[in-house]
Image (cartoon, rainbow, N blue to C red):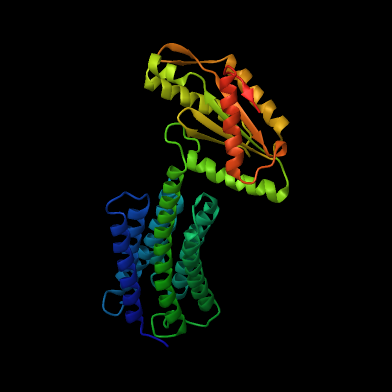
Amino acid sequence: MIFDVPTMAAMVAVVSLAMAIALRCVSSKEHVPGFRLFSIGLLCHAIGVPVVAFRAVIPEAFSIIAGNTLVSAAFGFFLAAIYRFYLKPVNCKLVMVPVALVFVSTIVLLNQQALRFSTMSLLMLLQMLSLFMTVWVRRHDTSGNSYRLLLCGVTIGVLIFASRMIAMLAGITSPQAVWHPGLIQTWTFMSGGVFVLFTAVGIIGMYKDRSDHYIKTLAMQDELTGIGNRRAIVQELQKRFAESVRHKTPLCLLMFDLDYFKHINDCFGHFAGDEVLKTVATSVKTRLRISDFFGRYGGEEFVIILPRTSQSVGVSIAEELLARQQHQSIRTEGKEIPVNFSIGIAATDSGQFEKSEDLLKAADQALYRAKEQGRNRLSV
């Protein structure tokens, strides 16, 4: 089915305007980096496409210069929005130079239709490729898979301008025919609507993925120390325990508790107690391996999960932590606070455990014994 050019241009403009409004609604209550720039780009696109298409009813020179520049500016705003979304400094040259080249080229090549059409297609193709590469390079910094929808939209944009340029160079179409109903024009405008829809919905989805990831992180993170919380510990332990059973590899669990922490709170205040917890968490975390998991189980109690670690290695790690802590004190509010802790150790190679909760309970019992035996020590 082939539609006339003004009708298709109006359809693309309506889609662009609708998505611009949608972006503004999404970001109306909360500032979202890049959304304002993206919505401005959509507005430029919504204006630029009809200006180019309605050449028969508006001055031709204005239609060519203003329309092409607005469409190119839309792509520039899209690129700037992506930079802002990733909280990166906007590459002004990459954003503004193509737009300036489009503006100058339309003026210089105003009366050279074939060369102007090919030049515009090439410059906008390069803008699409820049947009694609910017998202592709940062795909690993993106939570979720919505960025793929954005990439699909940009890929459609690449195909639009590549096909237009190829059609012109191959003689499939001519400058005089590009604004008359035909297969190339139908493909261009219909795909243009899909391009706008996919890119706008894609960036909205990327924001939702980021928000969901942030909420999930907060739900699994201890607010005071920044390490895993109790929920995160339980989930990680279940995962590692299942891996230990499946691959028949040892798993070691260290549970340690700060000695006389109530005395610290009573003598130095709860603020000092919080500083002690944060300092201990930071100190211990820096001495663990990347594969280890460290979390705050509750109060002054912490858990270290050591995958692929036997009981003997776990004891060595615990002894090192104890030895280091014995020679350190924590300074807060001008006071030196000596801090020691007791450690309970349990490992899958030292006994039979049917589930992860049994391993956690064994480490807790070992910690209780260490406390009974005088504190500042470990118990297996």
Q: Is residue 102 left or right of residue 316?
A: left
In the rendered image, which quarter contains the C terminus?
top right
In the rendered image, which quarter contains the N terminus?
bottom left
Visible in this render: residue 179?
yes
Q: Is residue 267 left or right of residue 253?
A: left
Q: Nearer the viewer, residue 227 or 362?
A: 362
Q: Say which residue appears at 36% left-offset and 63% top-offset.
A: 69
The spot of residue 319 in percent (x, y) is: 66, 23
Q: Nearer the viewer, residue 144 or 35?
A: 144
Q: Nearer the viewer, residue 6 or 112?
A: 6
The quarter holding residue 47 reads bottom left
Q: Is residue 378 above or below residue 268?
A: below
The quarter holding residue 294 reads top right
- The residue lying furthest to the bottom in this view is 1
Q: How many marks?
A: 0
Q: Is residue 343 left or right of residue 21?
A: right
The spot of residue 177 in percent (x, y) is: 42, 83
- The residue lying furthest to the top in this view is 335
Q: Is residue 145 above or below residue 7?
A: above
Q: Say which residue appears at 63% left-offset and 18% top-offset.
A: 323
Q: Say which residue appears at 53% left-offset and 40% top-offset.
A: 233
The spot of residue 71 in percent (x, y) is: 37, 65
Q: Is residue 172 above or below residue 42?
A: below
Visible in this render: residue 100?
no
Q: Is residue 300 above or below residue 42?
A: above
Q: Nearer the viewer, residue 194 or 187?
A: 194
The spot of residue 364 in percent (x, y) is: 57, 32
